[in-house]
Image (cartoon, helix red, strand yellow):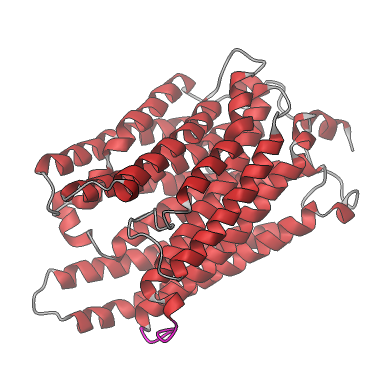
Amino acid sequence: MNTASQAEVSEIDPSARCTLTLLIATALFWLVVSGVLALLNFIQAFTPTFLADCPLFTYGRLRALQETAFLYGWAANAGVAVALWLLARLGGAPQRSLNWTRAGTVFWNVGVLAGLIGIACGEGSSAAGLHLPGYIQPLLLVAFGAMAVPGVLAWTGRSRPVTFAAQWYAVAALFLFPWLFSAAQVTLLCAPVRGVLQAIAGGWFVQGLWTLWLAPLALAAAYYLLPKITGRVIPNYDFASFGFWTLLVVGGWTGGRHLVGGPVPAWVVTVAIVSCTLLLIHYLVVAINLRGAFGQPGVVLKFVGFGLAAYLLGGLADAVTAMRSVAVLTQFTWFAQAQSQLALGGAFSMIVFGAIYFLTPRITGQAWLSTPLIRAHYAAAGLGTVVLIGSLAAAGWVQGHDLANASVSFADIAVHTRPWLQTAAAAQALLVVGNALFALHFLRSVCPCNAGATTLPFRQPPTMEASAS
């Protein structure tokens, strides 16, 4: 290993190798599973007879299975892995109590698997983002707490008095998810609120999963990777704290955008519209701070740049579609699915892909085996995401106009959206292939038998890591 490699890989990285490898491997497994389930779900959307005789995989159950595998399988495991790694690096000390994370990871994934079986058997709930059976959710809450222990210790026991934006977002995500998850369990399942309050609580939870959990995890990775790779400080860094608090304070009030036109008090929707508009300040700060990610060489920053572009575009789309005049056409159509894919697949997943590509050689001590496979994954993920979002948006736009026309029957609407849904299914198939290649590449690269087969392609790291991070 050369001098640059030794300087780049600190004792912090190998100490967490087994734990982070376990988290990332399980995350990639669920990513592929959720992609296959999504593909089956798209096929059912334009071919209703597909799997119609299999009660375990009806359209509603497949949708719940896919959403659950993505959120609690892929996003949770990968997000925690990235958060723990960067908190340890920025904290300046090896991670402690990793046994808690390993035990929590095992129980978390066993719970997700049991929950998916329960959903397939008809025992899931009807709450969006919370389809897991009620008897599984307390287990996940405890397991997540165990998984987050090293991250909390890295924050409270950091050796450096100064803190950075990446740490703020990572710690916020680790603390806010248990609050969101437990509050939703109580208000929607354990002691469900009545009437329109159920819709309000459901909208708050769905939006909170993104603005208060997944988005902070992605931004934590972006705020760390950009200065670390480029060696340049973040421009206008003083605004970063303003963007952070804007997301945390305002983001939780945007859930009412899902209820435009619904039987809820008008002020709930109005507050959500105003909040979506105010949140544009946060997106503006992110754009100013992280604009250096665009057009940079290197596969990691290509993933991060793609994800940031999707994140900013998604924020603008949320603000526009929250307006009542626009929501009349886009609400309850495929356009909402396009927005979801833009956030979860385009923003979160692409940024986390970049983070995994960056941290894996550092925790394993060996480089990725194949550069062409990395490029193939980027091409498949990028093209698949763009085509998927575009086709779903087109299907939603057509569907919205048809629904507004009383002379158009539901059968005609299905005919009009069918070509776009077929295109979406093809894009989803491309994503499955790309993510499966990524999973296999990761497993081969972390295999101990490949140690020493390649040299670490690290450049001399920036000398001002603390300031740049």
Residue 319 position, x and y percent, is 26, 44
Locate the N terminus and report the quarter of the image it occupies: top right
Residue 216 belongs to magenta span: no
Query: Image point 20% across, 41% down: which residue?
Result: 273
**From where the camera sits, is residue 299 visible?**
no
Question: As displayed, is residue 45 above or below residue 28?
Answer: below
Q: Residue 96, how many percent across, how many down?
A: 70, 28
Residue at image coords 45%, 38%: 177
The quarter of the rendered structure image containing the C terminus is top right
Residue located 44% across and 57% down the image: 132
| Residue occupying the far top of the picture | 161
Is 4 placed left or right of 207 in the picture? right
The x, y position of residue 116, in whole percent, is 50, 63
Residue at 73 percent of width and 27 percent of height: 94
Q: How many marks?
A: 0
Residue range of the region highlighted in magenta in the rendering: 48-54
- Please indicate whether residue 350 sits to the left or right of residue 314 in the image: right
Residue 53 drawn in magenta: yes
In x, y percent, where is residue 255?
27, 44
Query: Magenta span: helix, strand or loop, mainly?
Result: loop
Q: Quadrant of residue 267?
A: top left
Q: Nearer the viewer, residue 390 or 26?
A: 26
In the rendered view, would you say 151 is above or below 466? Answer: below
> 277 and 16: which one is in front?
16
Q: Is residue 288 visible?
A: yes
- 321 w.r.t. 251: above or below: below
Between 386 and 184, the one lying in front of the other is 184
